[in-house]
Image (cartoon, rainbow, N blue to C red):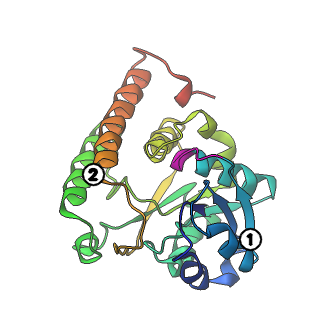
Amino acid sequence: MPAYNAAETLRMTWQDIPKEWVAKVILVDDASGDKTIDVARALSLDVIAHPHNVGYGGNQKTCYMEALRQGADVVVMVHPDGQYDPTLIPQLVRPIVAGDADMVLGSRFLTPGGARRGGMPFYKFISNRFLTTVENLVLGRRFAELHTGYRAYSRHFLETVPFLRNSNDFVFDTEVIAQAVAFGFKVGEVPVETKYFPGASSANFRQSLEYGFKTLWTMVRYLAHRTGFRRTRLFTH
């Protein structure tokens, strides 16, 4: 759980996690200004507290490194803000356990109309569709959605992909997907539902705009690397 100011929603999210599918819950707090750490410790979660805010991507780096250190075979990222449904964790894990995928994305667009029913703002809906279309063209794939924050990874995936070289901000997620394709990993998708509500964390319009431009730049870098025009350490061992 990469957490930032999630005190109000953390307990609700944790309660919905199917415990029989989860051996350990690790929460990394990115210097929250609320009582996220207190709530997490009251729930007996494994807590790592960043002394300074490093960003969404930097938070994930700590999450994955600690999960690997503790011997995880499959790692699921669940936002503690309640936006994604934790009861769907088995659906994300099964393809990895079965060997059918190395990375699984929880797509809000596999179910027609699901994203909008969940309250996704219209500008986010449009930008998601536009960016996913561009990325599919560049990556040569047909993913339903490439901007979900609900994901699962195999240990082998996290040990192979150089995610520590990635950005510390929101575009970390885009870079990981581009790396998955560059390294030839199997990426699966499963339908998930999401809820947008006042207590759920979400990038604001300015952050979303910045994220969009950085996503397009990541695709430019991937294309330059794939064609040999300009190699980058992001997509090499």
The amino acid type found where label 2 is placed reads Phe
Residue located at (55% from left, 58% from top): 101
Farthest residue to the right: give it.
70
- Give x and y (percent) for residue 56: 52, 50
- Give x and y (percent) for residue 36: 61, 69
The amino acid type found where label 1 is placed reads Lys
Left or right: where 181 falls relative to 210:
right
- Give x and y (percent) for residue 237: 64, 29
Label 2 crowd (10 A; few <14 / some 14-19 / many >=20): few
Circle 1 residue: 24
Label 1 secondary element:
loop
Left or right: where 213 falls relative to 88:
left
Q: CA distance from mark 1 to mark 2?
A: 34 Å
Most common SS among magenta residues = loop
Left or right: where 137 falls relative to 84:
left
Residue located at (54% from left, 55% from top): 103
Give residue 110's quadrant in the image: bottom left
Are dots 1 and 2 in contact, CB under 8 Å?
no
Is 229 part of what is drawn in magenta? no
Magenta residues (range)? 52-57
Label placed on residue 88: none
Depicted 16 relative to depicted 203: above or below: below
- Give x and y (percent) for residue 10: 57, 75
Depicted 57 relative to depicted 220: above or below: below
Depicted 26 relative to depicted 179: above or below: below
Label placed on residue 205: 2
Q: Nearer the viewer, residue 46 or 37?
A: 37
- Viewer-nearest of discs 1 and 2: 2
